[in-house]
Amino acid sequence: MSGPKTGRPPWPRSASAPLVSPLQPSVVYTSEGPDALDAIYGQGSGYTYAREGHPNADVTAGMIDRLEGAEGGILTGSGMAAVTAALLAVARAGDHVVGSDQLYGRSLRLLNETLPGLGIETSLLETGDAARVAAALRENTCAVLIETVSNPTIRIPDIAGIAALCRARGLRLLVDNTFATPRAFRPFEHGADLVIHSVTKLLSGHSDTTLGYVAAREAEVRERIVTLAVTMGLTPSPFDAWLAERGLLTFALRYDRAEANAAELAGALAGHGGVERVLYPQSPDHPDRARAVALLGNRGSHMVSFDIGGGRARAERFIRELSAIPFAPTLGDVTTTISHPATSSHRGLTAEAREAHGMGEGFFRVSVGCEEAGAVAPVFLAALNRLRSG
Ligand SMILES: *Cc1c(COP(=O)(O)O)cnc(C)c1O
């Protein structure tokens, strides 16, 4: 075999191709010479430097594109990198952005603190009624950011009304579709201009990779997102992208099992006297039930929130009684996990603000996993029974 005597030996050639996508961690790509490199940059016909793009990111982004019915979506280093790239691609200093007041905690912070620091005005409000959004619009409003299913309150915004409003007023609608996932809802089919994911969650699904995804309907916005991501360093690592590809191959299976388990858990909790309130899109008493049916059909996804009432001491005891379920502030794992918004995602709010949103000390959020059918709900019921008798 010829090749340099020092440094890296040449990569073996093979007439066959691997079935599994290779992991390509190379930061840099060599080319034949200045003409070839010029052509690669000029025509975008190859890879040059990993921050600018690499095959693992493109393969994984392409898989999510197919799920969302999108074109040219990009993978980012985290869900928050995707939210950031999306907002900065559509808003500049002097503009005004409207967001739901029930966004993911860090997205709230981005709108409350970071964007105003960059000269972008923001308003956060309840998005259950498009008329309220209309009333908050200003002359310089350029975009509205909502989540398909809110965290952790499992509310569903007036997406149809807000999409119609955005169209009429020339505003861009940004939809973070992390909780619903494209298996339950495809925002581009309902008027979204940009779709955002924390791929960290159910899409990747194994709590071992931190990634985001953002896609835009307009080619011009897509280009701005790519430039922002590459320039600001929001792009992902090949290894995370490679792990996410592996996760995505089983996404539909995991989603279906997790959703069935979630529906069963929601029903079981609703029937237990120790639970004051259960929030699940397919529950008959969900506050946005009509909208849930209209938008999600018979889908409910994998997130269930509920309130056992009482204060911190009762919450503390419940989590101890529920020791078989990991207490962890994330979602989308293959295993069922439970989180306590008051001490994690929403600890930045005052106790009064949390109460106003219905997330006091007794409020829990469950990310239901892919355990055997019938295995999850009894664990919760047993813990609630022990809590009641103890
Ligand atoms: C987790 C999450 C994010 C942020 O994603 P990271 O990958 O943690 O940066 C954004 N939006 C929603 C709805 C999320 O659940």
Image: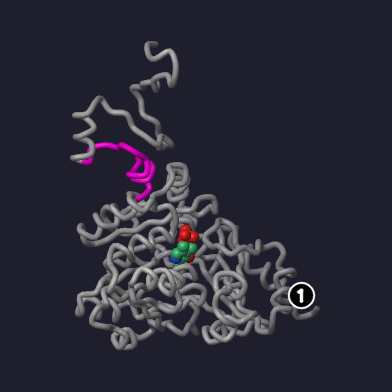
Residue 327 pos. (x, y %): 65, 64
The residue shown at (26%, 57%) is 224
Which part of the image, by quadrant, shows the C terminus?
bottom right
* Secondary structure type for disc 1: helix
| Viewer-nearest residue: 321 or 298 | 321
Residue 83, percent across and down? Answer: 38, 63
Q: Amino acid at mark 1?
A: Arg
Please identify the quarter of the rendering in which residue 73 is found: bottom left
Return the residue nearer the eye: 354 or 217: 354
x then y, percent, for residue 334: 56, 56
Instruction: Identify the residue shown where x is 32% and y is 64%.
Output: 88
Residue 385: image quadrant is bottom right
Q: Nearer the viewer, residue 288 or 218?
A: 218
Task: Single out the residue that lies furthest toward the right.
Answer: 390
Q: Residues within 10 Å of mark 1 (few under 14, many from 20)?
A: some
> In the picture provided, is 379 more to the left or to the right than 3?
right
User: In the rendered view, does 308 fall on the left or right side of 387?
Assistant: left
Q: Residue at x 49, y 70 (%)?
A: 105
Residue 303, relative to residue 352: is it above or below? Answer: above
Specify whether residue 316 is painted magenta: no
Disc 1 designates what residue? 386
Task: State yes or no: residue 47 in magenta.
Answer: yes
Start and end of the magenta stretch?
A: 44-61
Q: How is the image coloured?
A: one colour
